Image (cartoon, helix red, strand yellow):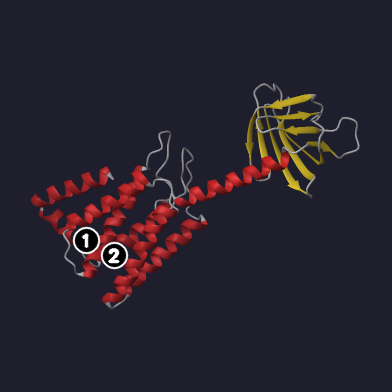
Amino acid sequence: MIVFLVLIVAIWFVSKKNEKIRFWKEKVIQQPFNYYLLIGLLIIGSFLGLYYTDRYGCIVTWEPFEIKNILFSAISLTLLLLSFFSKKRTIKRAFLLSELLFWILTLFLFKGGYVVGFIGTADPYISFYDTVTLALRLIILNSLLRTNINRVYLLICTIVIMSLKIYVFPIPYSFYVEERKYQIERENTINFLTLGEWIEIEDMTNKIRMNFLPENVVIYNLRGNDTLYFNHIYWGKQSVFLESWENSKHNFCTFEFKKNGNDTLTVNFRYRNENYKEENYKTQMTRKIGSR
């Protein structure tokens, strides 16, 4: 957003002394060029992952064909095109206002990219793109409403909305919903697996046994190993990732399971063997209450 402000100030100063810059500055923000520019930026932004992204933290992804990106971009583009091709000013305003409200809802409810990197700040490209396109929307809407509001106030409105996103609501609401969903699934997995001891059903002498505790997991007889302790546990919906550097040969293990009832599981162990090659072992296990 700072880059946007610097750019606006620079264009304003230069346009006072340069006729060409002044001409193009006025032309770009007037119809139909402002529509052309906004529609062009929307198409480019949807392909480059600037219109919509679910980026968060240090994970960098570029998925132009992600379903939400396609859906949100298509809705915005359709509303803008309907506004542009409509003959009546009232209909043009209605479609543009609908697109503006839809974009703002998408920005605050779904869009990521404002808590990225090690220090959790807004991606400069995404914030600049959103600031420019928001300003264009307000400029077009102002011209359709014929309110003759000073452009300075439109820029102030742009800065206020983007400041709310960057500094007050950088994490979209959908992230909190997903986090709450994950917490519920995590609690359900913990409550289900920590009740009793899990024992392999296979008819063999050294059956695999597992004890799940909230803070650690103990596995007995996993493919010839006596006892494995894991003190770092990451609970998922149908999987548990186990990690411990105290196990020299097996420092990680993923326990994937599918319920076959209240006390029976089909499980898959994914672990690294003594040669550091990943192996899989599938079996069935049953719960034994009161064995610990």
Which image quadrant: the N terminus? top left
**Amino acid type of the residue tagged 2 in the rendering:** Tyr
Q: Is residue 79 left or right of residue 24?
A: right
236 with respect to 158 (left or right): right
Question: Mark 1 packing: few (<14 Cα in 10 Å), some, or many (20+)?
Answer: some
Q: Quadrant of residue 115?
A: top left
| C-alpha distance separating marks 1 and 2 | 9 Å
Q: Residue 62, relative to residue 197: is it above or below? A: below
Residue 25, position as x, y percentages in the image: 18, 57
| Of the pair 61 and 108, the residue shown nearer to us | 108
Q: Nearer the viewer, residue 13 or 214?
A: 214
Residue beneath label 2, please?
A: 35
What percent of the width, then of the height, locates residue 5?
23, 46
Q: Position of residue 215 (x, y in %)?
A: 65, 30
Q: Do residues under tags 1 and 2 come within 8 Å of each other at their CB atoms?
A: no
Q: Which residue is mark 1?
A: 29
Q: Residue at x 64, y 23 (%)?
A: 245
